[in-house]
Image (cartoon, rainbow, N blue to C red):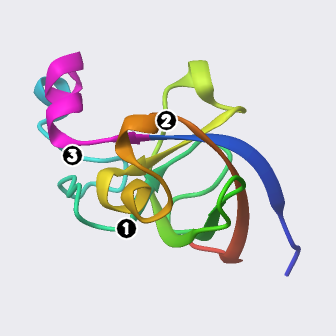
């Protein structure tokens, strides 16, 4: 297994943010893996990682970590710079008011 560690910016998303931007209406709340989005689950959206990958995300500023599963794809605009964490996952490593934090992302287990 090859080791992958990258530094990215982490943002967060919730049902309310998806509704506000119009994504919820278009996708009916479904993620790329076909399941309904749950902001309380420890999940993320990324284009750098495959659906099903298990990732360790560590906030560089405070060293707090969370394990998430990649279940969705982030917009192409942020494809190589950002990982989008569910609200619950982001809250484990930072205050929601921070909005975006620098993180280290490590692959723990390759998914599909």
Quarter holding the C terminus is bottom right
Residue at the image position 37 percent from the left and 57 percent from the top: 91
Residue 54 position, x and y percent, is: 57, 73
Disc 3/disc 2 C-alpha distance (Å): 13 Å
Residue at the image position 73 percent from the left and 67 percent from the top: 106
**Measured along the vertical axis of the image, is residue 101 above or below residue 58?**
above
The residue range painted magenta reads 12-23
Earlier sequence position, callout 3 versus callout 1: 3
Q: Is label 3 in contact with label 2 (beta carbons under 8 Å)?
A: no
**Measured along the vertical axis of the image, is residue 67 above or below residue 105?**
below
Which of the two residues, 99 or 46, is positioned nearer the viewer here?
99
Earlier sequence position, callout 3 versus callout 2: 3
**Measured along the vertical axis of the image, is residue 44 above or below residue 10?**
below
Indicate the secondary structure of the residue bearing disc 2.
loop
Q: Is residue 17 shown to the viewer in this render?
A: yes
Residue 65 is one of the magenta-drawn residues: no
Q: Residues within 10 Å of mark 3 (few under 14, many from 20)?
A: some
Q: Is residue 112 shown to the viewer in this render?
A: no
Q: Which residue is mark 2?
A: 74
Disc 3/disc 1 C-alpha distance (Å): 16 Å
Indicate the secondary structure of the residue bearing disc 3.
loop
- Report the residue that reaches farthest toward the right: 2
Q: Is label 2 in contact with label 1 (beta carbons under 8 Å)?
A: no
**Measured along the vertical axis of the image, is residue 12 above or below residue 90?**
above
Earlier sequence position, callout 2 versus callout 1: 1
Disc number placed over residue 30 in the picture, else none? 3
């Amino acid at each position: 297994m090859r080791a992958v560690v990258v530094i990215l910016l982490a943002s967060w998303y919730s049902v309310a943010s998806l509704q506000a931007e119009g994504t919820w209406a278009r996708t009916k709340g479904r993620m790329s893996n076909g399941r309904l989005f749950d902001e309380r689950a420890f999940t993320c959206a990324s284009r750098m990682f495959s659906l099903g990958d298990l990732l360790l995300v560590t906030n560089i500023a405070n060293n707090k970590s969370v394990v998430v599963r990649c279940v969705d794809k982030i917009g192409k605009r942020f494809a190589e710079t950002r990982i989008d964490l569910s609200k619950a996952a982001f809250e484990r490593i930072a205050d929601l008011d921070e909005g975006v934090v620098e993180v280290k992302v490590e692959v723990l287990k390759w998914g599909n």
